[in-house]
Image: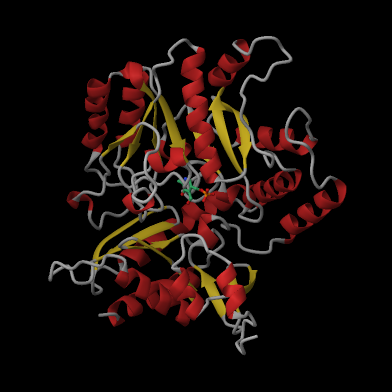
Amino acid sequence: MKNNTHGLSQAQLDAHWMPFTSNREFKKDPRIIISAQGNYYTDADGRKIFDGLSGLWTCGAGHARPEITEAISKQSATLDYSPAFQYGHTKSFELAYRITELMPDSLNRVFFTGSGSESVETALKIARGYWRKQGLASKTRFIGRAKGYHGVNYGGISVGGLSPNRALFGQGIEACHLSHTMINDNKFIKGLPNEGTYLADELEQLVALHDASTIAAVIVEPLAGSAGVIPPPVGYLKRLREICTKHNILLIFDEVITAFGRMGSNTGAEEFGVIPDLMTVAKQLTNGVIPMGAVIAKQEIYDTYMETGGPEYMLELPHGYTYSAHPIACAAALASLDILAKENLPERVKDIAPYFQNSLHGLKGCSHITDIRNYGLAGGITIEALGAEQGKAEPAKRPYEIAMKMWKKGFYVRYGGDTIQLGMPFTSTLPEIDSLINALGETINEIR
Ligand SMILES: Cc1ncc(COP(=O)(O)O)c(C=O)c1O
């Protein structure tokens, strides 16, 4: 056993092939987290580290909430597992109903999954099946958006628009892409940009090219998170909605990051005033404590499946996961949604978002920063690629160095591509926002 503070041997470190991680680098100098409480982690050296991304956009209510811990413990002692197919338990119905209360009225049928990626695959399948059940089996194509992130399964990477996540894996499903909205006119804009609404009209061109008879659905994140926080231009989502409705194409909002408080509302749909036909959620649903996702569908979609389901003993949708509506996940989600409601956390996000916005945009002028974006408690900073001037661009190098230096200083922030991403806990205090942003500014100025 190697003598180090985390107590793990090299063989143990090597045994775990870590996800979305530079394994070789990590295993030389591991960043091991031992515990979490409130807005802080404690690492193997006993250092407190501020959680500047709420886990992975998951733990907005802070870590180790006793209400969730108790709910999980009680549930595991009462009903630890219940077969997900053809049998039910009370918590899943309570939770489904509770979720519909947080949705725009017409989104009122909930299908449970185990993650954001599973939610996306489920929504894509529901969309295709819906058209087939209507006798429109040629409507199979999907339209995503450049820089979109919809998880890592084949449907998700096909509609996704982050090239590193696709390049290695070959053929996916039929999908084409709208342009992203991170245009030059929108640099350093606070909140929603006014420019770029016209980019939604590209959907008309794609419909003209492929014909609506081949298109099942458009899928977008209302605010793109993983690409580095790209808020939608004013009116953009509304325009997408109009074009989808006009051409009989379903609109899917991937709200895996934006649902349950991050935008200062229950959902991005509510915040931006546009109602999709299907919505995918996960992450904040259980405050990140237990994996769980869901797809929320308009009743008309559910009804179509029921009406065309054949004899009543037959399955209407041959799809589901062993862990769909897992009882412990349901208990955690109910407790988590209780906390959001009792502590008015979406409103709290709305209240402190302007402070966060001003603080974040105060970084303009630091070295290497070429853009800053924000909405609610989500912030993104673009860092100029190292070596860009010499034509040897390494876009991820500086963000990586910034994130590693921040970790050493006691702050966890995410780096992805050429961006630094912030997703503060909903329970952040104003001094915590200040200390994170100050440390970030100092660190960005330190790197070469
Ligand atoms: C918008 C969006 N969709 C899907 C996913 C995939 O979720 P998961 O990692 O739980 O599969 C993510 C994860 O970040 C996401 O941000």
Q: Relative to residue 90, is residue 253 drawn left or right?
A: left
Residue closer to the observer: 138 or 124: 138
Q: Could you say where residue 352 lies in the image, as x and y percent from the top left? A: 47, 59
Residue closer to the observer: 417 or 72: 417
Residue at 51% x, 76% y is 27
The C terminus - image quarter: bottom left
Residue at the outermost right position? 78
Q: Could you say where residue 187 lies in the image, as x and y percent from the top left? A: 22, 55
Residue at the outermost bottom position? 3
Q: Could you say where residue 55 lies in the image, as x and y percent from the top left? A: 54, 62
Q: Is residue 268 visible?
A: no
Q: Relative to residue 181, is residue 427 drawn left or right?
A: right
Residue at 38% x, 59% y is 379
Residue at 51% x, 44% y is 117
Q: Is residue 359 visible?
A: yes
The N terminus - image quarter: bottom right
Q: How is the image coloured?
A: secondary structure
Q: Is residue 362 above or below residue 285?
A: below
Residue at the outermost left position? 390
Q: Could you say where residue 81 lies in the image, as x and y percent from the top left? A: 79, 44
Residue closer to the observer: 120 or 25: 25
Toward which corner of the image does residue 7 lie, by quadrant?
bottom right
Residue at 46% x, 10% y is 135
Query: How many marks do you count on the picture?
Result: 0
Q: Is residue 167 above or below residue 86?
A: below
Residue closer to the observer: 408 or 38: 408
Q: Relative to residue 257, is residue 35 drawn left or right?
A: right
Q: Is residue 354 above or below residue 132?
A: below
